[in-house]
Image (spheres, grey):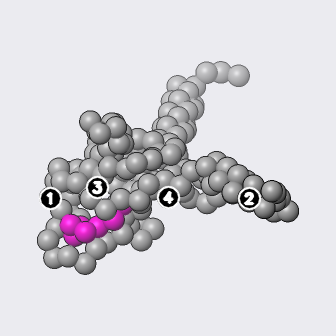
Amino acid sequence: MERSATRDFIVGLFVIVGLAAIAYLSFSVGGLSLGSNGGLHLFATFDQIGGLKPRAKVEISGVRVGQVESIGLNPDLRAKVELDLERDLKLPIDTTASIVTSGLLGDQYISLQIGGEEDVLKPGEEITFTESAVILERLIGQFIHNTNVGEAKPEEAK
């Protein structure tokens, strides 16, 4: 079988297109975006963030509107989360940010509930109404330790 420059070129082009498609799918599935979403950077402070990670999605009514840019600690030792949202969003100042889980054991993300005020949040401001993550292990522990089915209470044992 003879080497053909045309055939070699077509095979090489096919390999390059295949590698580009694999790279695109890898970035899409991994949630990596090239650059920021546009510039509305807001902050939210939570008592407990659970398994929230940078690049987690931020949603309004189930629609992705941004991502978690970074997570750090405030001087009062509460978690401070920076959100990178779409530039054209007009969020009222009484917007609420909640950390929720997709499904029973899925990834955690931030859900924004829109408020009713007319004043809107400006870049760099903080969402003051927040709801921390629910930690499943703590709920199970509280349920186990707070149930006294069939046990006598210490006062009744006397």
The residue lying at 33 percent from left, 45 percent from top is 81
Q: Residue at x 40, y 48 (%)?
A: 47
Query: Foreground mark, 1 or 2?
Result: 2
**Residue labelled with disc 3:** 85
In this view, the mark in front (3 or 1): 1
Q: For the point 45% across and 47% down, which residue is it?
A: 48
Q: Which residues are magenta?
A: 90-97
**Which of pointers 3 and 4 lies earlier in the amino acid sequence?**
3
Instruction: Label the magenta part by its dominant secondary structure.
Output: loop
Q: Secondary structure at mark 3?
A: strand
Q: Which quadrant of the view contains residue 122?
A: bottom left
User: Is there any visible trace of residue 140 in the rendered image?
Assistant: no
Residue 38 vertical position relative to residue 63 in the rendered view, above or below: above
**What's under tag 1, amino acid-wise?**
Lys
In the image, residue 8 above or below residue 135: above
Picture residue at 33% right of the left edge, 65% below the top: 96
Task: Give how far apart the Cα atoms at labels 2 and 4 are.
Answer: 40 Å
Residue 113 percent across, percent down from the top left: 36, 69
Q: CA distance from mark 1 to mark 2?
A: 57 Å
N-terminal label among 1 and 2: 1
> What residue type is disc 4 on?
Val
Q: Earlier in the sequence, mark 2 or mark 4?
A: 4
Whether 94 is among the magenta residues is: yes
Disc nearer the start of the sequence (2/3): 3
Which residue in the protein does label 1 denote?
A: 122
The disc at residue 100 is: 4
Q: Residue at the far right: name it.
A: 150
Label 2: few (<14), some or many (≥20) within 10 Å? few
Q: Looking at the picture, how far across and down is residue 153, in whole percent?
A: 76, 59
Find numbered disc 1 in the image and state the secondary structure of the residue it sits on. Answer: loop
Residue 155, disc = 2
Q: Position of residue 105 (x, y in %)?
A: 64, 53
